[in-house]
Amino acid sequence: MAKDFSGMEDSNRSSNPSIHQQSGPSRRVLLQGGAAAALAALAGAFSGGLTACASLPTGERLAFKRVPPGQGDRLVVPEGYVATVLAPWGDPVGVAGALPAFRHDASNSAAEQALQLGMHHDGIEYFPLVGSNTHGLLAINHEYTDDGLLHVGGLQPWTAEKVKKSQAAHGLSVIEVELKGATWQVLRPSRHARRVTLDTPFDVGGPAAGHALMRTAADPAGRRVLGTLNNCAASQTPWGTYLSGEENWIGYFAGPDKPSEHEQRWGLRPKGYGYRWHEHDERFDARRHPNEPHRFGWIVELDPSDPDSTPVKRTALGRAAHEGAWVAVTRDQRAVVYSGEDSRFEYIYKFVSRDPIRPGGARANRTLLDHGTLYVARFDADGRGRWLPLLQGQGPLTAAAGFADQGEVLIKARQASDLLGATKMDRPEWLAIDPRSRWVHCTLTNNSQRGSPGYPDTDAANPRANNNMGSIIRWLEDGDFDGLGFQWNHLVLAGDPANERAEARGNINGDLFGCPDGLAMDPRGLLWVQTDAHATQMSQGEFARIGNNQMLAFDPARGEFRRFLTAPTHCEVTGIAFTPDARTLFINIQHPGESPGERSDPAQPARYSNWPDFRPGGRPRSATVAIRRADGGPIGT
């Protein structure tokens, strides 16, 4: 996540007991003993699980030369690697007969932007065509817009056309790509090319479909929503679809002068958070359309291989400020979908499907994610945890408590989780599931309000006050991925150990980093970590040593983090997608040159960065980058 909507990240004022108030080992014991045990256990788990990757090299697992901390406005990869900018904001996606070129003065119209790659790329996945490692589709999220860069004159004046263009720059893109020689290229035109914007119809699936709280004047049935927004992380399902999380959607809505308790719990404000869409699109005025916000905050599913398919909002997975969703598979072939809510003091969820995954791809599994049970996590101080079911009629989730049916439980997932006593986390972001060891990893990117007056204190799972640097937590389910209990520990407390208090000392072996965000397992069992420190943090405190945001590889056998790349000025490194043979890595560089206030000055569009075009007076552009070894070998070896 890039934007810091603080009002959306501290709305959890529930009285759930903090873990440090529960019985069990002290926080010092967990931090000093748990980290070492985590590394040892992870190394042991991997030692017997690499035979599945026997076709890949088995030599040194981190064989690339580390790059130094980054300070300049450039993307740096290791010696022997080549990074190619593939798909920047504004390039045409490749819809036949509609290939509007990007104009560097930001004068493209809203209609043109709806046919071009959106702004601020985030999650990305590669979908091979006919099993190819060199020809496939990329599905890409576009999280938010910087209207100072997007429009001529920025927000002045603010017009209906600028609202439409901002809406067109959100959503998803599907592009066709092919490796030609040693270079990846976007194929245009392409029958697969697609843009999904705020005008794209979505079906609603699951228990909240047709619910009274989902109905609006424009959609009295409550089963068809226009658009998706603030899409953050993404993943690929075993049946070949793309899952995308709707994150800070509440910031686009203007609420009443006195929001209800329900609206306050979701962070709704009278004037919104600066997008001002409600001034020219009444759909985003929650005073006039109070149910419209309920139609966002879902995991959306898209079939990239079928450009005519209708994407679906999967309500059975719960409504939240979703970072994304990732699928594990039980031994009896049911889908288990993990997700985190990237907001301060919010929760980690998992959904267990009722039915097994069926052969036949997307068509055979079109309703798989509409039936099953959603759970929220409680992390106990003794290193154990429980999954608490969000089921209407069970425990406190009764009609008397405001949950008339299962649809209402899912629409009000935060309030349901509050009542169940789930653990308030430090902004859960990406997850990575190792199918060999079966450990599930989650980045807790940061939480500067942890332990502050009026906010929750530290606990075992979130052990640091004023947590500016974040951590990676992980757990192992009891039995199978559908287990109701688990063991957990910290893989790492991020930051510079020299600046930590003794009882919360960091445990990084290798290169330093802060604010872990993107996360993925590669085919060899390396854990890849991307960082997202805000522009206001750069070159301050611990970041004076850490430098620009970066991407690292972690080798569990050695317990070592090694810096693989450093990014341009003030950007986030995000999106991790490998080709099946692991010889190409696709990443996204988001919001290069972000200003500390997150809104660019239209008179100085390249004040902090001019990446990747480096045009005098040009605009910095988020972009997808393809990374390969110069000799064509697997990434990281």
Image: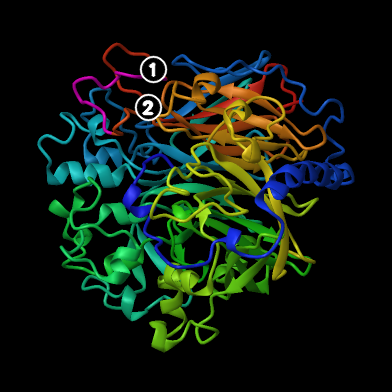
- For label 1, the SS is loop
Task: Tell me where residue 18 appears, x and y as whole percent.
Answer: 54, 61
Question: Which of the marked residues, 2 or 1, is nearer the chain's N terminus?
Answer: 1
Q: Quadrant of residue 353?
A: bottom right
Q: Residue furthest top?
A: 616
Distance of label 2 from label 1 (alpha carbons): 8 Å
Task: Tell me where residue 413 appears, x and y as whole percent.
Answer: 45, 69
Identify the residue at horizontal 36%, vertical 42% (top origin).
4
Q: How is the image coloured?
A: rainbow
Q: Name the residue type under label 2.
A: Arg
The residue nearer to you, when weighing 225 against 32, is 32
Residues in magenta, as a range? 599-611
Q: Name the residue type under label 1.
A: Asp
Q: Quadrant of the N terminus?
A: top left
Task: Tell me where residue 189 appears, x and y as whole percent.
Answer: 43, 36
Q: Is residue 448 visible?
A: yes
- For label 2, the SS is loop
Q: Is residue 303 visible?
A: no
The residue indicated by pointer 2 is: 621
In the displayed structure, 332 sits above or below 12; it is below
Q: Quadrant of the C terminus?
A: top right
In the displayed structure, 461 sits above or below 121; it is below
Q: Main secondary structure of the magenta part?
A: loop
The residue nearer to you, when weighing 218 against 130, is 218
Task: Tell me where residue 403 appears, x and y as whole percent.
Answer: 41, 82
The residue nearer to you, when weighing 381 against 292, is 381
The residue indicated by pointer 1 is: 613
Q: Quadrant of residue 274?
A: top left
Relative horizontal placement of residue 103, taking residue 92 as reference (left or right): left
**Mark 2 vs 1: CB contact within 8 A:** yes
Identify the residue at horizontal 23%, vertical 41% (top origin).
110
The residue nearer to you, when weighing 374 against 217, is 374
